[in-house]
């Protein structure tokens, strides 16, 4: 299982200079102002609604959340080679895997609410998700062939390791208008996920099991409103998050020797894990509830103000796609086999800190600029002019929110 960051839309380097177009109501008001010579330009500016004014500010809360979650992704991957034999490490792994992936998916859905299939959105879907998927699926496949398995196939239909999330996000975002048109989209998505949980014949094309089983979290993000995120920032929620995480850790410690990690990966049916079909339905709803609660608890402790790492939250796609080479490279080179001390408590702490530091470095602007051609390509030559310019729509508040989702 490889978790991933959330919705990939480019965060400009440097800060975007795009303007918010004036909404219809504001345009009407502006026309009336033009017909009234007595009104000064200053009065006209004052009358313009806030939504119509230039705004390029990103929400530090979401950038902080993305950075902290992507660091947890790297740490979780670093624990996998040394987790065997340590019940405490496995318990911590289970708790982290319960919410860092759902957090990314929920936020991805939240920032996909404005997707309607307009030309500039299609362009961003292709350059921000589809092209990086193709590039890194091929890159990871070649990497595996050179370092571990010479016969490993190169297939764009069978995502390997980290790339499955890009395939899933591409499908989820394409279907966004469908979910927003339904009266009760979340129950429908949960029903689809439950059906997929006991359908072992779905196959592995584009990681379809994960696409369907993680779908309710994306749809949940679509139906959330800003006030819901304001709710989790309340002091009472933050205090309640402490016993929630304590209880989750205690339960995970009990379940560590009784429960398979595959349940958290959502990439197989219940029968594939040797469980009766109905177990998949129960686990679908149980894990969904657990993920939502722990994600809310996690978000309640995310800082709301600008921190030293806030700017790194805009580079999570780069860190996510690159850190897999470090993790798999260490595994294939035998580092964990030849250094037994890494399996000791001190070694696990060292790996945890090292993973956090490496992910932080990979999210920095210099690294992003270096790999931008692969992770965030422009490709203006491949699109019609209206898709490249976005007809001014990219500067809307909704468009700015999509860019924040990177």
Image (cartoon, rainbow, N blue to C red):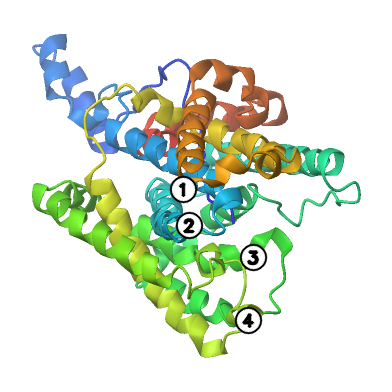
Whether residue 131 appears in this view of the structure is no
Mark 2 lies on a secondary structure that is helix
Gap in Å between the C-alphas at discs 3 and 2?
17 Å
The front one of 20 and 259 is 259
Residue placed at 33% from the left, 59% from the top? Answer: 223
In this view, the mark in front (3 or 1)? 3
Residue placed at 51% from the left, 89% from the top? Answer: 278
Circles 2 and 1 in contact, beta carbons < 8 Å: yes
For label 2, the residue is 176
In this view, the mark in front (3 or 2)? 3
Mark 4 lies on a secondary structure that is loop
Mark 3 lies on a secondary structure that is helix
For label 4, the residue is 199
Gap in Å between the C-alphas at discs 2 and 1?
7 Å
**Which callout, 3 or 1, points at the residue further toward the start of the chain?**
1
The front one of 341 and 177 is 341
The front one of 100 and 29 is 100
For label 1, the residue is 115
**Which callout, 3 or 2, points at the residue further toward the start of the chain?**
2
Circles 2 and 4 in contact, beta carbons < 8 Å: no
**Which callout, 4 or 3, points at the residue further toward the start of the chain?**
4
Residue 317 located left or right of residue 249: right
For label 3, the residue is 208
Gap in Å between the C-alphas at discs 2 and 4?
24 Å
Residue 321 image point, x, y percent = 61, 37
Gap in Å between the C-alphas at discs 1 and 4?
30 Å
Residue 302 image point, x, y percent = 26, 40
18 in relation to 132, above or below: above
Q: Residues within 10 Å of mark 3 (few under 14, many from 20)?
A: many
């Amino acid at each position: 299982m490889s978790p991933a960051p959330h919705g990939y839309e480019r965060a400009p380097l440097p800060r975007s200079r795009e303007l918010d177009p004036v909404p219809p109501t504001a345009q009407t008001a502006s026309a009336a102002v033009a017909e009234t010579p007595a009104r000064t330009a200053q009065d006209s500016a004052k009358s313009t609604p806030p939504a119509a004014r230039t705004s390029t500010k990103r929400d530090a809360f979401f950038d902080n959340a993305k950075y902290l979650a992507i660091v947890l992704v790297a740490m979780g991957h670093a624990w996998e080679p040394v987790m065997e034999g340590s019940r405490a490490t496995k318990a911590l792994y289970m708790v982290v895997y319960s919410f860092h992936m759902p957090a990314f998916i929920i936020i991805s859905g939240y920032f996909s609410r404005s997707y309607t299939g307009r030309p500039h959105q299609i362009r961003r879907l292709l350059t921000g998700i589809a092209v990086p998927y193709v590039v890194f699926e091929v890159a990871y496949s070649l990497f595996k062939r050179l370092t571990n398995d010479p016969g490993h196939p190169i297939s764009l239909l069978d995502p390997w390791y980290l790339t499955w999330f890009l395939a899933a996000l591409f499908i989820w975002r394409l279907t966004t208008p469908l979910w927003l048109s339904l009266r009760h989209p979340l129950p429908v998505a949960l029903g689809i996920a439950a059906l997929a949980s006991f359908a072992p014949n779905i196959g592995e094309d584009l990681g379809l099991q994960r696409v369907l089983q993680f779908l309710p979290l994306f749809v949940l993000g679509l139906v959330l409103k800003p006030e819901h995120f304001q709710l989790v920032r309340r002091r009472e929620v933050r205090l309640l998050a402490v016993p929630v995480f304590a209880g989750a850790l205690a339960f995970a410690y009990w379940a560590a020797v009784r429960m398979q990690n595959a349940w958290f990966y959502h990439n197989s049916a219940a029968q594939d894990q040797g469980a009766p079909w109905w177990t998949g339905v129960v686990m679908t709803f149980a894990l969904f509830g657990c993920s939502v609660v722990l994600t809310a608890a996690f978000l309640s402790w995310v800082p709301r103000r600008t921190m030293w790492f806030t700017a790194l939250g805009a580079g999570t796609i780069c860190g996510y796609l690159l850190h897999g080479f470090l993790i798999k490279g260490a595994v294939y080179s035998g580092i964990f086999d030849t250094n037994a001390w890494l399996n000791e408590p001190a070694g696990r702490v060292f790996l945890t800190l090292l993973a956090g530091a490496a992910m932080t470095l990979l999210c920095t602007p210099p690294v992003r600029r270096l790999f931008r051609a692969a992770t965030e390509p422009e490709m203006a030559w491949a699109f019609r002019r209206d898709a490249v310019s976005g007809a001014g729509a990219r500067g809307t508040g909704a468009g700015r929110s999509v860019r924040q989702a990177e």
